[in-house]
Image (cartoon, coloured by chain):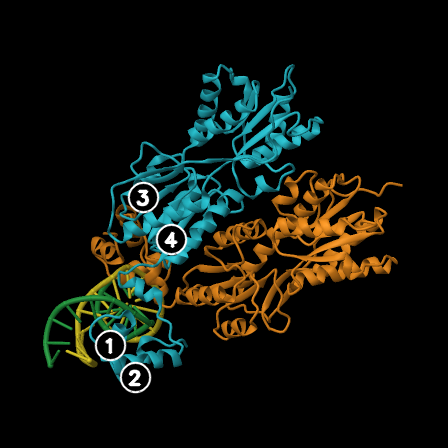
Chain colours: A orange, B cyan, C yellow, D green
Amino acid sequence: MKATIYDVAKEAGVSIATVSKVLNGKGKISTETREAIFAIMERLDYQPSLIATALTGKRTFTLGLLVPDISNPFFSEIARAIEDQSEQLGYSVMICSTDNKDAKVEKYISLLQQKKVDGIIIATGIDNKDILEQLLSKSIPVVLLARDMPLVAVNTVVVDDYIGGCLAAAHLLELGHRSVAMLGEREKVRSSRERVRGFRQTLEESGVTFTPEQLRHCDYKVEDSRVKALELLSVEEPPTAIFACNDMLAVGALQAAKELGKKVPEELSIVSFDNTVLAAVTNPPMTTVAQPMEHMGKLVVNMIVDELQGSAPVRQRVVLRPELIIRESTAAIAP
Amino acid sequence: MKATIYDVAKEAGVSIATVSKVLNGKGKISTETREAIFAIMERLDYQPSLIATALTGKRTFTLGLLVPDISNPFFSEIARAIEDQSEQLGYSVMICSTDNKDAKVEKYISLLQQKKVDGIIIATGIDNKDILEQLLSKSIPVVLLARDMPLVAVNTVVVDDYIGGCLAAAHLLELGHRSVAMLGEREKVRSSRERVRGFRQTLEESGVTFTPEQLRHCDYKVEDSRVKALELLSVEEPPTAIFACNDMLAVGALQAAKELGKKVPEELSIVSFDNTVLAAVTNPPMTTVAQPMEHMGKLVVNMIVDELQGSAPVRQRVVLRPELIIRESTAAIAP
DNA sequence: ATGAAAGCGCTAACAA
DNA sequence: TTGTTAGCGCTTTCAT
């Protein structure tokens, strides 16, 4: 079997307490025994059991990450950022794909608690806020990422969706577009609504009208957005630009344009949101409102670890500024 | 604090042994006390600590997953499949992105062992096979996924890369292509070499020559493959088709074609490998050799869990057949 | 049908 | 400087 602290102690002719001390660099231990013990640990290939450690009340050094779907590029990119920072700080991360189903959320949350994870990062939608509130009462650090529940007092890291919408609109306006459309996510998605709001408001401030018919809500599927984009483009006087709420939806718009024989960006400009790998890979490469994913991931694990360290600050809500990345899917309208 | 088994026992006026038994449905317990105990567990919102359970020698119900990079669509899609099957079977999964660095691999493996994961799925490259051999001596189930180390006796799930290469060549041949090129991964990547081998052999069997100059090795970056594709296409008599070793490289080829003003598929056919979301999202959608990712994920966790259940079969190597998905990036050569 | 007690591997007082 | 001992929360004989 694997060597335990007892094996090391016996082999070194000391008590387990001594071994434990050198292991944790605590107490006063003579250099000789310390060295000897290290040597023996090495020789026995001793690895302290984190399970046992955790049982004595210490951390498990594991974080839970709830996302809708880890195979969605946005979340897998975020996950990578979170994993990297976690690893830096000595933590591992457990991924949980919820498909945005409350039932799965509840199941995973309870599982994570049983596994005594040190903190939970929630990047998935939760319809029933009671689930979240109950979790918060459990004295385990929780941070919402890329999701917002303004009515709940919980640490949050989000991008400023409203500004993102503004950025997209301003860019299009600057290129001379006056007739634009938008592809949003389902209505209940808050961030999508905010993007719409910023987009619309910026347009209207420039005297460009944006009516409900110029907005379509889609599922997160290119097929759906393709169809919706087709609708948007098949009217009497089609828009010259489309703002899609995320990269995947923008792909659908791109396909619709191709289907209609419209050249992008010459005949139709498209701007997306997120800046995942998808945006860089389309043809043409997509102009997009980028979310600072690495930064978000880093921040969110730092917040959790800070809270664990006791330096528990007041509940905070960090709002990051998105950034417009101009690539080749947008152009000035033909004169 | 959280309720423990002691709280439940006390509340029910029984011993913790009894509670433990009803918890695990073991031993003989009168229906009355059983019901009573369940009621109390409910009321106290009692959740057994999996840490404590694990310490008594049982499973941790956690699997480790080593991938090069979880933000790479191929691996995030595989991860999703693994997560789903794990969840079905009651396991959680811990992700570890190694960047294909042996040092990170070693670090993560040791960490996973300390956390007493029940099994490890390795979908990352390992240069030094000693690392793997040492792990295998540890009596913890290990399965290699989408990676091959023929010299090591370890359970493996892979796709038949050779056949994949054949499929791509056969498709191109059938469309009339006689002058083709290929974008591979770095030479040390075994699966890439196999794809090349199948591709070349099928061509040669049809009397089509395939020389070393028609093959370029790339890093996993669209920028690199774009450059290499540009080279391939900038010769006297450029190929009429390119087979890229994975979807990302195919994107680079697509960009190169565009840069040269070559229409895909009219003037250049492209076939890729993997069938991740990228292949579906390009313009035109990519013809690709698909890996059965969901199936691979499912299989690999089943193998681990079977081994844990003691039904330990002999070491096996499961080779899945890839499948050609024809989309719009390939066409017959102009007459 | 139920309970007492040992043990899983480690940490943390408190002694010595 | 080092050792003794009591937990942490649960499982599992072995008694009763």
Residue marked by disc 1 = B18
Q: Position of residue B245 (x, y in %)?
A: 52, 31
* Coordinates of residue A39 in the picture (x, y in percent): 29, 47
Q: Upstream in the sequence, badge 1 or badge 4?
A: 1
Which residue is denoted by mark 3 in the rendering?
B135
**Distance CA(mark 4)–CA(mark 2):** 35 Å
Residue B229 placement: quadrant: top right
Mark seen at residue B63: 4
Above or below residue A300? Residue B264 is above
- Is A324 situated left or right of A20 in this image? right
Q: Earlier in the sequence, mark 2 or mark 3?
A: 2
Whichever of labels 1 and 3 marks the residue nearer the N terminus, that label is 1
Query: In the rendering, which numbered label is found on residue B12?
Result: 2
Report, in whole angstroms, how far the alpha carbon at label 2 lies from the one at label 3: 45 Å
Query: Mark 4 or 3, which is nearer the eye?
Result: 4
Mark 4 and mark 3 residues within 8 Å of each other at the beta carbon = no
Crowding at dot 4, Cα within 10 Å, few <14 / some 14-19 / many 20+, comes out as many
Q: Secondary structure at mark 4?
A: strand
- Disc 2 marks a residue whose amino acid type is Ala
| Mark 2 touches mark 1? (CB < 8 Å) | yes
**Chain-order first, disc 4 or disc 3:** 4
Q: Secondary structure at mark 1?
A: helix
The kind of residue on which mark 1 rests is: Thr
Q: Amino acid at mark 4?
A: Leu
How many discs mark residues in the rendered view?
Answer: 4
Q: Is disc 4 in the same subunit as disc 2?
A: yes
Residue A319, image x, y percentages: 67, 62
* Residue A272 shown left or right of residue D12 in the figure: right
Task: Kindly report the distance in space between the C-alpha atoms of the residues bearing marks 1 and 4.
Answer: 30 Å
